[in-house]
Image: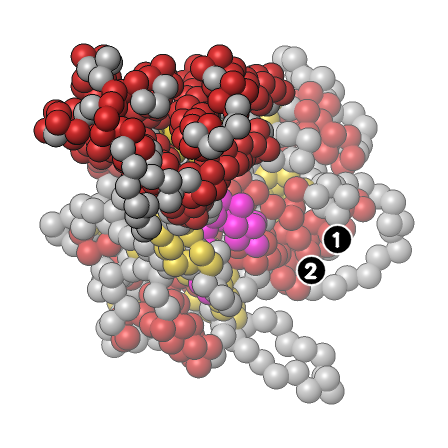
Amino acid sequence: MLGGIFSLHSSWKERSDTYMHKPLPLQCTSLNFREFQFAQAMLFAIEEINNSTDLLPGISLGYKIYDVCGSISRGVRVALALANGNEVAPSYSEAPCSRPAQVQAIMGETSSSPCMAISTVMGPFHIPLISHFATCACLSDKTKYPSFLRTIPSDYYQSRALAQLVKHFGWTWVGAIRTNDDYGNNGMATFIETAQQLGICVEYSVSFFRTDPPDKIQKIVDIIKASTSKVIVAFLSHMDMDVLIHALPHHNLTGYQWVGSESWIFDSHTAAMDRHHILDGAIGLFIPKAHVSGMGEFMLDVKPLNSSGNKLFTEFWETLFNCKFKQSESPAGNQRECTGHEDLTGVQNSFTDMSLMPIFNNVYKGVYAVAHALHSILSCNKTCNNKGQLDSFLILQHIRKIQFTTKEGDEVYFNENGDPAAKYEIINWQPTENGIVDFVPVGLYDASLPADKQLNVQNKSLIWAQKSQQVPLSVCSEKCPPGTRKVLQRGKPVCCYDCLRCAEGEISNITDSITCVRCDPEFWSNERRDACIKKEAEFLSYEEIMGALLTAASLLGTCMTAVVAFIFFRYRQTPIVRANNSELSFLLLFSLTLCFLCSLTFIGRPSEWSCMLRHTAFGITFVLCISCVLGKTIVVLMAFRATLPGSNVMKWFGPAQQKLSVLGFTLVQVVICILWLTISPPFPFKNFKEFKDKIILECALGSAVGFWAVLGYIGLLAMLCFFLAFLARKLPDNFNEAKFITFSMLIFCAVWITFIPAYVSSPGKFSVAVEIFAILASSFGLLICIFMPKCYIILLKPEKNTKKNMMGKGPPKSF
């Protein structure tokens, strides 16, 4: 014997109990044709099994079916009646409680909440309860519901599949409505949890039940109207969705994209009630299509029972054909009398609609699961061993372990939680020209596949809200393009953010980046801040104007020095050339040539050899130059002293001593440079700090002490030379080279004193240009001040270039 619990009525009349008298039985209302179909599916399976010679041969299955009207308390009551063998009306018996149950298994109930209550009561008795449509994930808990099984996948998978579906279409800002029962609350809780993991935000989540007062529905309508999300996830039973559909058209709530659970997304009655096409384009999940041969014909081949005492079937027949039997109340004015021979052909209502065949198939598979378990327990072959009593716990254990294939090829089995494999079709509501909605499969979800392959959607065949071909947009904030990063808005969910442009030197090359990545030191962000580009390397090059001008000045100085040297060589026998140690003059010209040429080492891309050469060559050549000038200054002073009576100074500072002094002064600088290059030499260096978007290629000093020691030594010699030349400035005019040396040293010192602050404060390549300018300016100062007056006399005033004129005496002139 199998029990059946179905809500053949969907509601009941409210009553107020006074607790003074025994409560009256529930007065059920709203006949539910869908539940009649489920009951018919159970009867079809039982009849097919009873007519089979392969399954349970010689054993007949019977049934007891009760109507619980959707009431949880009534469901528990009839379940106990099925277990105890009592009718719904109480009867008292002396029989022990340990006797076998009157039914071997119970089929039903359709909703999750009644199943939870019934399974809680039936659990201690181990009577299997097999539901065809109760999907709450909570029912998978075998510690609470040990005897519960189902032939429909758990909402554990459906809720996650809905979240993945929402994510697939890029909807990150959605509203949520649920039935206020275990089905809706648990299903929505799992959906919200998964949605948050996938980066989806729920703007609002509201619940209601079909028996709630109208003001509760109105509050939900107001929340939807005030929201900014354009996608609504509805985890509702079909009866609750019918209530909501009735309320929405009065408030012009159109243009929303609905995402539905399996309870209503494939319900033709809900689609028929949507006369204002609010749900057009809805998308959701439903169990895959199924076909059971013979079931449709069996359901439609229904006849009224001969027993006039079955009020339920009488009500069903009268509602189905809108008529009244003679035994009933007198027919209303628009009703005819029922004959019992009415034909369903041509009748269009929810009872003749076979679109829910996948659910009928679930009922069918549940009945067959019990039959296969009994077949195994009774060791059936050609006959069954039906001696002895059937233990409900043994039946439950066998049902959990069964695995068989139906005549249509469907494989049936239960996992450790009593659930079947989770597979869903993705259904899209597509309106036709005649106003009827087609439930079009547009994809598949299979939880048994790897995570990245579970969802498969055919985007091209989809129709959206208001018959749009474009995927609706439902986001709190637009996507942040590359080059920006997301910054959360205070007090808002994570999906609400502002897009801030990446700072200089940082990029983001993906959409919706939460951070900007800093470019490597040798790279800089482009204008759009979406890519790092190589920084421009800056150094003083020959190709740019400043480098070319400095090169030209250096070559000009070299040429001028060469010309002066040629003139001096050409007129080397003349008194003005011979007057002041012509060898020192030629050595000075040679050192000046090196000074002009060493400036070229500062131009061009720095390398290891150029960095070491530029400072050391500059230091040594300038010391050589200053040493020669110092030697010439000393010669002037010594020459004047030598003219005094009894003076033999010149023998102590003759030509040999002059050359040795130049060599000695220069060797000191050479030693400083060697120490500098040995301990910490200059090296090429990439300066990233001076400019954000450029790399300054420069020569690091290595040892700052070495650099300033070189400059300090040059400065010391220059000051000494200036001091001695200043002392000799008032010597006789015709033989006075000291005043020209004084002028040259004055220029030299002025240049290098101003060089220091200019060098320190100049950025990048300009510091190199300042150093080159100082070298050239001081070199030109020496060349012009010392040699130009002599060249003037040699070339333009040859009459003064005589020994007599050189030895002439005249009054000294001051300056």
Q: Quadrant of residue 559?
A: top left
Query: Which residue does the image show at 73% across and 23% down from the upper left?
Result: 377
Query: Which residue does the image show at 65% across and 46% down from the upper left?
Result: 139
Quadrant in which the N terminus appears: top right
- Which numbered dot is residue 543? none
Query: Can you see residue 433?
Result: yes
- Which numbered dot is residue 77? 2
Q: Quadrant of residue 445?
A: top left
Residue 541 within the magenta-colored segment of the rendering: no
For residue 515, side relative to residue 509 (left or right): right
Query: Which residue does the image show at 42% across and 40% down from the upper left?
Result: 728
| Residue 84 at x, y percent in the picture | 76, 51
- Residue stretch rendered in magenta on the structure: 189-204
- Which numbered dot is residue 121? 1
Q: Is residue 38 above or below residue 615?
A: below
Counting residues from the start of the chain, the first of labels 2 and 1 encountered is: 2
| Residue 481 at x, y percent in the picture | 31, 46
| Residue 158 at x, y percent in the picture | 49, 42
Q: How dense is the environment of label 2, judged by Cα within 10 Å: few (below 14), some, or many (20 and up)?
A: some
The one nearer the camera, 193 or 307, is 193
Q: Amino acid at mark 1?
A: Val
Q: Amino acid at mark 2?
A: Arg
Name the secondary structure under disc 2. Answer: helix
| Residue 311 at x, y percent in the picture | 49, 62
Q: Nearer the viewer, mark 2 or mark 1?
A: 1
The one nearer the camera, 234 or 324, is 234
Q: How dense is the environment of label 1, judged by Cα within 10 Å: few (below 14), some, or many (20 and up)?
A: some
Number of marks:
2
